[in-house]
Image: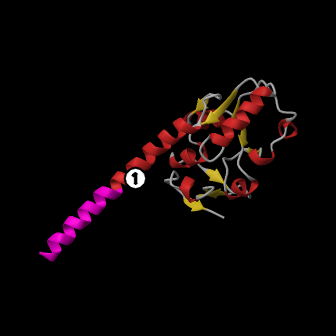
Amino acid sequence: MIVKKLCIISNVSLILLISVCAKAQTKLEDRLDTLLNHTVPLVSQDELAKMLSKKKVILFDTRTKKEYNVSHIKGARLVDYDTFSSEMVAGFDKEKPVVVYCSVGYRSEKIGEKLLELGFTNVQNLYGGIFEWKNHSHMVVDDRNTPTDSVHVYNADWGQYLNKGIKIIE
């Protein structure tokens, strides 16, 4: 009798766990829908991967230096949201495609808006940011340009959206 009750409890627990995991993925989509203004066109992880393979894109990481040092998409340049200035992007070809990203897309959308105001003509925001990049099994590198599984998740609340990799909160 006790074993049967434990099996039932285990099955219920498993169902609840699966339900929570499914909701977390849906919640990211829902959260992004309320978070983003869609003022900067979105680009998918796979589309960005193709662009990077052809080396036809400027890639800006709009997170903090601390987040960037833990990991970033290879080839990305740091353009810190908190300290952004037009000098950070001076000298870049304003006609060349630019993709901005952050953890999930909010900060990068704001920097994308500023880039458009500065005259950049082809700016896109990575949908779901570095979290979705890593969730889709794309590579990230650390501050020594070495591949890593670590991703700075900003805080525990945002960290729920990183499903693959090692969550770093510092």
The x and y percentages for residue 17 are: 35, 58
Answer yes or no: is residue 101 visible.
no
Residue 77: give x, y in percent of width and height.
76, 44
At horizontal 19% and vertical 65% (from top left) the residue drawn is 8
Residue type, mark 1 in image = Cys
Magenta-highlighted stretch: main secondary structure?
helix
Colour approach in the figure: secondary structure
Task: Write the start and end of the magenta stretch as one range.
Answer: 1-17
User: What residue did someone put label 1 on?
Assistant: 21
- Residue extending farthest to the bottom is 2
| 136 over 43 or under it: above or below | below
Q: Residues within 10 Å of mark 1 (few under 14, many from 20)?
A: some
Say if residue 86 shows up in the picture: yes
Q: Residue at x 59, y 44 (%)?
A: 104
Q: Nearer the viewer, residue 107 or 88?
A: 107
Q: Residue at horizontal 83%, vertical 33%?
A: 92
Residue 13 lies, in percent from the top left, at 29, 62
Taking 6 as reference, is 1 left or right? left
Q: Is residue 38 above or below residue 65?
A: above
Among the 4 quarters of the image, the one containing residue 71:
bottom right
> Any magenta on residue 13?
yes
Q: Determine the residue positioned at 20% across, 68% down.
A: 7
Q: Which one is nearer the viewer's eye here, 45 or 112?
A: 112
| Quadrant including the N terminus | bottom left
Secondary structure beneath label 1:
helix
